Amino acid sequence: MAGKVLFDTPEHKVFLFEELTPASAVQANQYLIIHRDEAMLLDPGGHKVQSKLFSDISVLISPKQIRYIFLSHQDPDIVASINYWMMVTEAEALISKLWMRFLPHFGLDSKLEGRVIPIDDKGTKVKLGGDCELMIIPAHFLHSPGNFQVYDPCSKILFSGDLGASLGQDYFFVENFEDHVKFMEGFHRRYMASNKVIKFWVNMIRKLDIETIAPQHGAVFKGKEMVEKFLSWLESLECGVDLLKEEDYTLPQ
Ligand SMILES: [Fe+2]
Ligand SMILES: [Fe+2]
């Protein structure tokens, strides 16, 4: 079965693929934004996912219509299948300039490197299908040092990458935020760099009109009320270097 529909109008569609990761791997969501005759594939994942994702996408569009492959950061659950996707599409891949030279280590063929576009730290905008302008937003240190997110103004969805990720819950949409916190807390406290960075990010993100926050792992936050609950929880979260103590750096005995 192809992806779940997150947004659906005649000219603009967004799909979520959430069930393709094998059981031993961390669950990962892949997203496809289609605007008119072009698409962006977000964080395609690893080798175990690639051929299932390809056939699910083929039900919806011709993979040749994938204009961009967005890579939020350098982790294997994002990037490992990059050579495959560059072979089976004509897309350009977008990734932080920090990670450009790491892609060949995932097996990216040197013939394909010319289609990888480095994103400068400040982010950028790209047009899909002629008139849908996607914003590539900086989210550095949340968690990767070179980290971006995509805001789609046509669906008002923010694709937040690892921010907002949850692990272990058995639902696709967050219904009860307070109950959901336990599935996010451990990951955010350990992986996100600091509350200082989170506050910078929340202040920037509040300027956008967001209906849905769609993370790369776990459940999606749907509706303005749920989005605001997530932002206010995150804003006061201590994480990363905030929590470190000198005794965390003791040589093993
Ligand atoms: Fe990551
Ligand atoms: Fe991830």
Image (cartoon, rainbow, N blue to C red):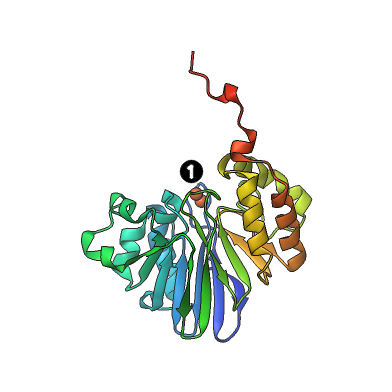
Q: Residue at x 44, y 49 (%)?
A: 75
183 relative to 7, above or below: above
Mark yes or no: residue 58 visible. yes
> Disc 1 designates what residue?
24
Q: Position of residue 152 (x, y in %)?
A: 57, 73
222 or 121, nearer to the observer:
121
For the image, the number of numbered tags is: 1
Q: Residue at x 24, y 59 (%)?
A: 109
Q: Position of residue 164 (x, y in %)?
A: 63, 54
Q: Residue at x 62, y 45 (%)?
A: 188
97 or 110, nearer to the observer:
97
Q: Position of residue 1 (x, y in %)?
A: 52, 67
Residue projecting furthest to the left: 111
> Label 1's element?
loop
Q: Which amino acid type is marked by label 1? A: Ser
Residue projecting furthest to the top: 253
Label 1 neighbour load within 10 Å: few <14, some 14-19, many 20+? few
124 or 44, nearer to the observer:
124
134 or 25, nearer to the observer:
134
Q: Position of residue 90 (x, y in %)?
A: 32, 73
171 horizontally vs 57: left or right: right
Mark yes or no: residue 60 visible. no
Q: Is mark 1 within 8 Å of ligand 2?
A: no
179 horizontally vs 146: left or right: right
